[in-house]
Image (cartoon, helix red, strand yellow):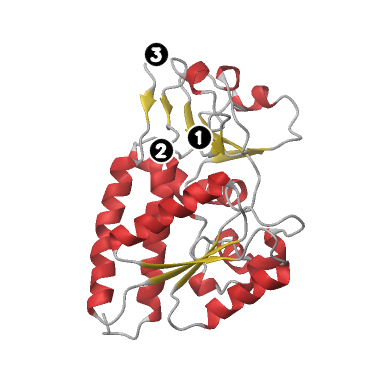
Amino acid sequence: MDTVSLSGKELAAAINADTKARAAALTDGGAAPRLALVVANDDPASTWYVNSLRKAAERLGIACDTVDLGSEASAAEIRAELTARGADSATDAIMLQTPLPAGVTLDDVSSAIVASKDVDGVSPLSLGLLAAGLDGFVPATSEAVVELLQHHEIPLTGRHVAVVGRSNVVGKPLAQLLLAKDATVTVCHSRTADLAAVTATADVVVAAAGRIGLISGEHVREGAVVIDVGTNEAADGKIVGDVDAESVRGKAAGLSPVPGGVGPVTTALLMRHVVTAAESDRPSGSA
């Protein structure tokens, strides 16, 4: 079986074109949309992603303030910065990059992000709005998975989707988004007994656990679609996913590449969220 590469580059380009035009309209109206990117780690994969976000913002006409609090920052320091940015009228959007310093969890600090500026949908209020099916920003990586599947015309209604990973930033919100598309969803995790037996029954497998090579050919049934959300640093310094791509190719009908799959769509959606937040924040008629 030929395994189709489910690239996200074409979809990301289309989203970016729209975002750039909207950002230009806001800039013409008085000020460029502005993102505050708060970082408190020295993780190589995170650094790579932060740099990609900054470059994307620059290309699209979005101002990006990177606030590096250092890997020793306390929960109180992170919350204080998030609160200050929330009160700053010049800041339209806020994103807190993970991982966080040792001893600090997302639960400790995410409630300090104002929901109207929470463009990655990580605060308890944003997640609650998603769970209730109400309007709000949703985690961009989870949204990217659904957008990528739809872009490649992979049906979700009535299909069984196995999501491997239960984080609040990918796995859980993705399950909510998939349910909204009428998929039947199984969320797997580190304590799932016989993971391969579960994922091998799915029409779509989404790997979002943050473990290199976790999903291999034995985890995938013939003709299934595999979406790789992982961004892990390999021993040679390259960014690789959670899927052992070589063992899956030839068995899966489609596989998203790393890099070039979910990643560019996630970045594009984040930038679109920034512009949406800015549009909502500006007085009517100002842009």
Residue 19 seen in render: no
Residue annotated with mark 2: 261
What residue is shown at x 61% (from left), y 38% (from top)?
210
Q: Secondary structure at mark 3?
A: loop
Callout 2: few (<14), some (14-19), or many (20+) C-alpha neighbours within 10 Å? Answer: many
What residue is shown at x 62% (from left), y 55% (from top)?
41
Image quadrant occupied by the C terminus: bottom left
Q: Where is residue 232 shown, x and y percent of the image? A: 56, 37
Looking at the image, is mark 3 or mark 2 earlier in the sequence?
3
Q: Answer left or right for 100 relative to 284.
A: right
Mark 2–mark 1 Cα distance, whole angstroms, equals 8 Å
Image quadrant occupied by the N terminus: top left
Q: In this picture, is 36 found above or below 262?
A: below
Mark 3–mark 1 Cα distance, whole angstroms, equals 19 Å
- Do the residues under discs 2 and 1 have CB atoms within 8 angstroms? yes
Callout 1: few (<14), some (14-19), or many (20+) C-alpha neighbours within 10 Å? Answer: many
Callout 3: few (<14), some (14-19), or many (20+) C-alpha neighbours within 10 Å? Answer: few
Q: Secondary structure at mark 1?
A: strand
Residue annotated with mark 3: 1
- The part of the image, by quadrant, that contains residue 35 is bottom left
Looking at the image, is mark 2 or mark 1 earlier in the sequence?
1
What residue is shown at x 67% (from left), y 60% (from top)?
106
Mark 3–mark 2 Cα distance, whole angstroms, equals 20 Å
Residue annotated with mark 1: 228
Name the amino acid, label 1.
Answer: Asp
Q: Where is residue 45 shown, x and y percent of the image? A: 54, 44
